Structures are given as structure tokens and as C-alpha cells.
Image (tube, rainbow, N blue to C red):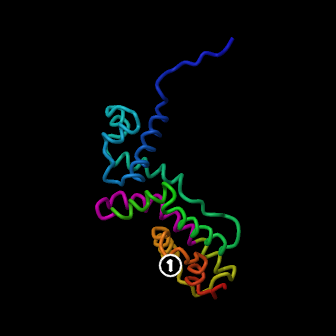
Amino acid sequence: MPELKVRGRPRSEDVDLVIVESVLDIIAEDGISKVTMEGVAQRAGVSKASLYRRFPTKSDMAQAAVERMRQESPIIPSEGSAYERLLYLMEGTRAGIQKTRYGRIMLAVISTSHEHPELAQLVYNRILQPRRMRVREILEQGIEAGEFPSTLNIDVAMPTLIGPMLYLGMWSMCDPVLHTRTEDVLRSVMGLPQKN
């Protein structure tokens, strides 16, 4: 006898996920200023009462959205040389800033950080700071292995490696940005001779 499927309300965690995904979609498509309780409820297909029951304030909703974003963070490889891992990370940052939801959300957070400093700080603490520590580890391993100069200032190198990738990613449609090689940036920051 075939099993009967019983329809019912979605599980609570499913509704939470739909709401959080709706928040992230709105930020990626329209910007942070367009995130409203009414708009999120409409996009998620839930009542405002249901939304407020789960997330009483926009701050609560933002925290849940940031935690969800952490799962979309670009992978930092754990295998390969320090040079190869950094190059992979830089290429991923450059390519993803415009082409992925994660990248578009990051641009939205950066561009409105003066208007939403609490959200910017939350993203930094929960997403960027842990990633900075991983980049630091890779740089330290590269110095120890002799891949990078022992005189490398890691605190300066970290933002100097990633910052240009944001710029090159945002202006990827323009010359000469399009023809600037990521590996050339890496080698320049590391003080390594350029490849032909």
C-alpha cells in the first residue's frame, strides 16, 4: 500500500532558512537599504507575525543572515604550497566579487559601512577576521618554508594582497584592469621577481 504524504506547515528551521535566504537575496540584488520587515516577509512568503516571532528586530535578522553567509565564504585551500593557496584565494576573491551572491553582499556591506557600522562590524568579526587569521597562517608557513622573504611584514601584506582583488573584481570589465594578472599582484607584494 503506497505511503500517504501528509501535508502540513513547514518545519520551523525550514521557515528560518527561507527568511534568512530572502534577506541575503534582497541585499545582493537591491542593497541593504531595501531590507525591511515587510519586504522580507513578502519575499519569504511568510506572515509578518511569523517573521517577528522568529526575528523580533532587523538586528536579530542580520545576525542570522551573517551566520548563513559564513557558509558561503570562499574556500581557503588547506593543501598545496603557501604560494599556490594564496593565489587560489586571490583569484577566487577577484572573480567572486561581482559574480557570486557572497561577493555582491560584501560590496553592499562595504559601500554602506558608514550607514550601518554595526552590520559591518558583525561581518568583520564573524567572517573576515577568521579568514584573516587563516591568511596569516598561510603567510607564516610560506616564510617558514622559504617561499616568501623572512622580512615580509604580514600585517601590511594581508590587506595589500586582498585590497587589489576587490578593485580588480569591481572594475573587471575595463582595460587595463582586465589584463592585470592576479599572479603579478601576488609576486609584487611578496617581493618576488615577475614571471614573463
- Whole-percent x and y of residue 98? 48, 61
Circle 1 SS class: loop
Q: Relative to residue 2, is residue 152 drawn left or right? A: left
Question: Is 131 included in the stretch rendered in magenta?
Answer: yes
Q: Residue at x 45, y 35 (%)?
A: 15
Question: Which quadrant of the structure image shows residue 170?
Answer: bottom left
> Which residue is the extreme one toward the left?
115
| Residue on which the image places disc 1 | 176
The three-letter amino acid code for the residue at tag 1 is Pro
Against 10, residue 36 (above or below) is below
Residue 121 appearing in the image: no
Q: Residues within 10 Å of mark 1 (few under 14, many from 20)?
A: few
Residue 67 pos. (x, y %): 47, 50
Q: Quadrant of the N terminus?
A: top right
Was residue 129 drawn as part of the magenta stretch in this picture? yes
The answer to whether residue 64 is above or below residue 117 is: above
Q: State the quadrant of the C terminus.
A: bottom right
* Percent of width and height locating residue 37: 31, 42
* Residue 86 place in picture, x, y as percent: 61, 72
In the image, residue 169 above or below residue 180: above
Q: Is residue 111 visible in the rendered structure shown here?
A: yes
Q: Residue at x 53, y 62 (%)?
A: 96
Q: Quadrant of residue 186?
A: bottom right
Read off the magenta span: 113-136
Name the residue at 31% across, 45% down. Answer: 36
Judged left or right of residue 112, residue 20 is right
Q: Residue at x 41, y 52 (%)?
A: 29
In terms of depth relative to the viewer, which is nearer, 32 or 64?
32
